[in-house]
Image (cartoon, rainbow, N blue to C red):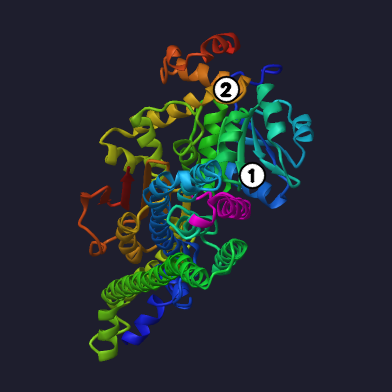
Amino acid sequence: MSADLNAPAHPTDASETPNRASVSTPREPDSPAAFAAPAAVAHASDRGARIAAVAIALAWHVAIALPAVLSARAEFAAPAVVLGAWILVAVTGAVAGVRLLQGSPLPPWPLAGLLLVVDAAVFAAAGERQLFTAANWVWGTLGWFFVLAVWGRRVVGLIALLSTHALIALVAVLVHGPDPADVARYVMYVYGTFSLPVAVFVGSTVIVGLARERAAVSAAGHAMAAERDAAERGLRERRDRLALVSSAAGRVLGDLAGGQADPDDPEVQRRCMLAAARLRRLIAESDDVPDPLLHELRAAADLAERNGLPIDLVTIGTPPPLPVEVRRRLADPLTGTLADARGWARLTVVSGPDEVVVSLVTPDREGPESTGPPPGEHDDGPVQYLYERDGNIRWAQTRWRR
Amino acid sequence: MGADPVAAVTGDRPVGVAIVDDHPVVVEGVRAWLATEPRLTVLATGDDPDAVLRAAPHADVILLDLRLHGRMALDKLAELSAAGRRVVVYSEHTDPQTMLAALDAGAVAFLAKHEGREHCVETVLAAASDRPYVPPALAGAMVGDPRPDRPMLSDKEREALLLWFQSMSKASVARRMQISEHTVKQYVDRARIKYTRAGRPAATKAALLARAIEDGLVRPEEIGIYRSQATHDRPTP
């Protein structure tokens, strides 16, 4: 029996629909929101690396290159050129660093071109004696500014710039007369200028990539957890609904199946009709229609009509959106009265933005009270229920006020 | 009464009724309903308002089907009402907007076709004496009137209209509200009189209002803007 009862409850559960749709979606985050989180994590991680690169470049330029340049300024072939170039790179590097941190870096290739021109000028102006000293500051500093210039691009660009720098240095070494010791020094210096900037550059790229990946994995995990929560909620709602349906129809069906109830007994027929009305209303409740309350009442009226009761359903106005609990309290007490109705019935709904009044009038007759709360006035939260019989009519009314 | 069709029906002479409907079976049905009431006599029937009125120029009340030959005869209704003809609209179109539009155009009453003999006879008799009669369907339309410029009804008037619409029994409304049936009718009729302000002015509205003041149903100052018009158009008793 429970399988039968499950049937109407299952396909009509509107709250399930979104869950069912999401179950079929792939596990990877494919929505814009799912992309946004990893991107934000990657961005934060990249920002840290940028700050480090800018700090290294400027600190090296100021703390190591400047004292060396100042102490050796008398020994340069053209001190003004070396000093001026230092100032130019300091200013340009500061601007480039600030722009990089703001997320709007300077155009990379003009900046790189300027740095290479400075490179060549300083090599030319340093003179033979300062070629391999700390005073020839382009050895130590320029590689870091190359890193700032081509930040976020492929590592090939950085290697090309460093190679050009190495070529310029090689020309300078050769011009000053090749000495085996100089060549050995040259190789050592080139290695030194290459290794650190390239390591930082590649390392930061890898870290950003890893951060992005980890964030994506974690976002996918969250999405799965949310999906599972939604599925569990859907299941819980379906169980609640099944419990409601079982209480509506389970007992009378059980009695009929077990032979304790006689289908010819008017009381059993009344219970069946009541259960059917409740089932029908529960089904209508979860339909996605513009006026759920009217839809539910129409379903109840349909059933009464099918059982041979002439029923007049008149609606005035459109009900505002009502929580399902309020709709239940508005409609439920009347279904009981409707199941007992004989002769005719008049069901009216008058709706305004702040008030909905549902009324059911049927001819009064001898017999037991209808199913539902006893006669009189009852306040059930925001819904007031009123039932009376005056020998002429039975009158049930539910009224919701905002 | 001749030139003044708004003049109240007096004495022992039965009320003359003209029926305008494009369905002969409906005409015959309504004629049969009215025939059970000796105070009513059907003078002419037909599907063209002008032809029917030519045949019965002295008809006291016109029962007009609002939908004639596929179109809504609201213009015709307004024209007749402005000329002082007491028109009771009866229609199967019972959506509230249509009912309120008919009142605005000057209909003395609106009767839903399914409302039956009793309401039909009551409505025509009330209309002939310029007294309001509010059948349940019309009460529903009035209580649910969503228009921002709707007449201001008191709580009791609203409640009486609502319960009358729901139960269709003034005795039950009276029991529920713990007042007399007469008072229930007064609340409902007062609400109807307040609707004489809505829409365009018509001689029929002025007559309804004048009679309501005469009967003590409303005081002139309760109606405001309509008072001056009422005194102008008030029929000589």
Rendered image quadrant of residue B57: top right
Work out whether mark 1 precedes mark 2 in sequence or the reverse, and give the earlier one: 1
**Residue B98 pos. (x, y %):** 60, 40
Rendered image quadrant of residue A262: bottom left
**Residue B8 pos. (x, y %):** 57, 20
In this view, the residue farthest toward the bottom is A258
**Residue A287 pos. (x, y %):** 45, 66
Residue A119 lies in the magenta stretch: yes
Element type where label 1 sits in the image: helix
Pick whichever, A328 or A332, lies toward us: A328
Name the residue carrying label 1. B31
Residue occupying the point 27% across, 75% down: A243
Q: Is residue A191 above or below residue B25?
A: below
Residue occupying the point 61% across, 41% down: B90
Rendered image quadrant of residue A78: top right
State which quarter of the image contains the N terminus of chain A: bottom left
Name the residue carrying label 2. B205
Q: Is residue A231 above or below residue B76?
A: below
The image shows a total of numbered marks equal to: 2
Pick whichever, B123 or A315, lies toward us: A315
- The three-letter amino acid code for the residue at tag 2 is Lys
Q: Are marks 1 and 2 on the same chain?
A: yes
Q: Judge from the rendering whether residue A237 lies leftward or rightward of residue B217; answer left or right.
A: left
Q: Magenta region: which residues?
A: A102-129
What is the magenta segment's predominant secondary structure? helix
Residue occupying the point 42% across, 14% down: B219
Pick whichever, A315 or A216, lies toward us: A216
- The three-letter amino acid code for the residue at tag 1 is Arg
